[in-house]
Amino acid sequence: MPKSKETREKILRIATDIMLTSHVSQLSIDNICKRVQITKKTFYYHFESKDQMLEAVAEGLKAHYEAAIESLAAEAGAGATVHARVQALLRGVARESTRRD
């Protein structure tokens, strides 16, 4: 992966981590740059604004959770009842939250 793409992905990973584990006040460009170890100039090379970066984070989270839901639905089986699918979804959510802790 080219270094530029790696940097963009790292920015998104760190911003996502901050969103999921910290207070919103920690989601500043300065804090992201400090944690990624880049300059603001580098940040703005990858994103025109903080809003554009947040849109990319939201898209990444959406894709992640859509894939997880599809996987959990498949885990329940094609002919599963709604009850079985909901149980599979809840088991998956429990597993995911355990991994984050």
Image (cartoon, rainbow, N blue to C red):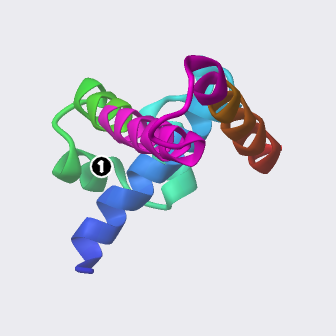
Residue situated furthest front in the rendering = 79
Q: Is residue 9 left or right of residue 88?
A: left
- Residue 38, quarter of picture: bottom left
- Tell me where residue 93 appears, x and y as whole percent: 68, 34
Helix, strand or loop at label 1? It is helix
Q: Is the magenta stretch mostly helix, strand or loop?
A: helix
Q: Give whichever of 65, 21 is nearer the camera.
A: 65
Q: Name the residue under label 1.
A: 43
* Figure check: 94 above or below 75: above
Q: Give whichever of 28, 4 is nearer the camera.
A: 4
* Figure check: 70 above or below 37: above
Q: Is residue 24 left or right of residue 90?
A: left
Residue at the image point whose x is 56% and y is 19% from the top = 82
- Tell me where residue 46 appears, x and y as whole percent: 21, 51
Residue at the image point whose x is 41% and y is 52% from the top = 11
- Disc tally is 1
Under mark 1, the amino acid is Phe
* Figure check: 2 above or below 73: below
Q: What stretch is highlighted in magenta?
A: 59-86
- Tell me where residue 51 appears, x and y as whole percent: 27, 24
Please check the rendered image and state whether residue 65 is part of the magenta-colored stretch, yes or no: yes
Q: Is residue 98 left or right of residue 55?
A: right
Q: In which quarter of the image is the C terminus?
A: top right
